Amino acid sequence: MFKDPVCGKRINRGKAHVVIEHEGYRFFLCCPRCQTEFEHNLQLYARPELGQKVKKTPVQLHRY
């Protein structure tokens, strides 16, 4: 379960209206209204403690 940073509603990853990735964190939003509010007030809502850290996958180089 994830918490929408705008309204505080708890949502499942698959039920999120949208997932926004910003500065290495994912934010799960429940509806278009919360998405608009989030996008217009990033400094208020895009805080690390309100998101999920994105795991970096190492890039594998293939030699031929």
Image (cartoon, helix red, strand yellow):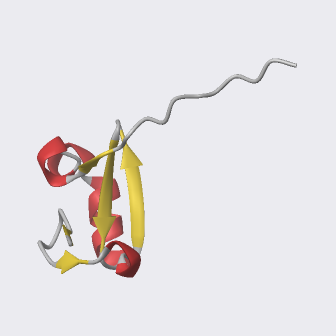
Report the residue that reaches farthest toward the top. Answer: 63
Residue drawn at the location 63% of the way across and 27% of the way down: 60
**Quarter in which the N terminus is drawn:** bottom left
Residue drawn at the location 37% of the way across and 40% of the way down: 55
Q: Quadrant of residue 5?
A: bottom left
Q: Position of residue 39 (x, y in %)?
A: 34, 56
Q: Quadrant of residue 61?
A: top right
Q: Position of residue 35 (x, y in %)?
A: 34, 67
Report the residue that reaches farthest toward the front. Answer: 64
**The one of 10 and 41 positioned closer to us in this rendering:** 10
Vertical order, 55 against 9 (above or below)? above
Q: Quadrant of residue 40?
A: bottom left
Residue drawn at the location 59% of the way across and 28% of the way down: 59
**The one of 35 and 59 positioned closer to us in this rendering:** 59
Q: Position of residue 15 (x, y in %)?
A: 37, 81
On the rendered structure, is 25 left or right of 21? left
Residue drawn at the location 35% of the way across and 66% of the way down: 36
Q: Position of residue 30 (x, y in %)?
A: 30, 77
Report the residue that reaches farthest toward the right. Answer: 64
On the rendered structure, is 49 left or right of 22? left
On the rendered structure, is 63 left or right of 32? right
**The one of 56 and 30 positioned closer to us in this rendering:** 56
Vertical order, 25 against 6 (above or below)? above
Q: How many marks?
A: 0
**Quarter in which the C terminus is drawn:** top right
